Amino acid sequence: MEINCNLIKYIKIIDNVMPKLVLESLLKVCKDSQSFGQGHVLKKNDSVVDKEMRNTFVWPMNNLGEKSLTTVHWANYLSFLFGKAITDYNNIYNIYGRFNISEIQILKYVEGGFYKFHVDHDLELPRTYSCILFLNDNYEGGDLIFKFPGDNNEHKIKTKKNSVVVWPSNFLYPHSVSPVVKGERYSVVSWAR
């Protein structure tokens, strides 16, 4: 069975989402942070480290119960930024309804870091929208790649710093991050429902 529809048109890239000085400040905070831990994946209703599936470092951005005012500041700012990106996405595609940002994480991929093909929505973790904000582009590898059902081609999204990519979180949008071969890749991911 072949699915013949253009799913890539529902992946939207929004450029220049924050002022240059703000982007530079956030990137410096990320490079100086000691808050990154090993990335987890959801397996059988449990969050586990699986370096065969995902090899990246994660800094969760929380604004409730967080002791660090720096983290609270960036969590609030990034929540606003992703909320605006999803609102813009909804306006482009004439989608009406409310949404809530459910989670924000800053990711650091060092050389060899990757994330194999996966989808972001799960019964245990229901999500409607997925977003990635690219903080830098001075690395090699680390490409965001989509592979749609019924399509044998891989679709690489050009990573450009200070841009947000928004797409549906559902099973039609499996995606991966190819291994970083040189440098470090910093990005922020968020989901909404």
Image: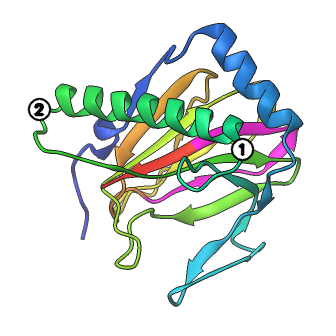
Residue lying at the far bottom in this picture: please name it: 44
Position of residue 103 measured from the top left corner of the image (x, y, whole percent): 48, 54
Quadrant in which residue 125 is drawn: bottom left
Instruction: Please indicate whether residue 137 sits to the left or right of residue 156 in the image.
Output: right
Identify the image's colour scheme: rainbow, by chain, secondary structure or one colour: rainbow
**Which amino acid type is marked by label 2?**
Asn
Q: Secondary structure at mark 1?
A: loop
Q: Residue at x 10, y 39 (%)?
A: 96
- In whole angstroms, how far apart are the C-alphas of marks 1 and 2? 38 Å
Q: Residues within 10 Å of mark 2 (few under 14, many from 20)?
A: few
In the rendered image, which residue does mark 1 sit on? 68
33 shown above or below 170 = above
79 shown above or below 158 = below
Which range is magenta? 174-188
Residue lying at the far top in this picture: please name it: 20
Front one among 30 and 118: 30
Q: Residue at x 81, y 25 (%)?
A: 28
In the rendered image, which residue does mark 2 sit on? 94
The answer to whether one can see residue 183 in this image is no
On whether residue 86 falls in the magenta region, the answer is no
Instruction: Please indicate whether residue 151 sits to the left or right of residue 60 in the image.
Output: left
Front one among 149 and 40: 40
Position of residue 105 measured from the top left corner of the image (x, y, whole percent): 60, 49
Position of residue 174 measured from the top left corner of the image (x, y, whole percent): 45, 60
Q: Residue at x 20, y 26 (%)?
A: 92
User: Which quarter shows the C terminus?
Assistant: bottom left
Q: Residue at x 34, y 68 (%)?
A: 126
The answer to whether one can see residue 80 in this image is yes
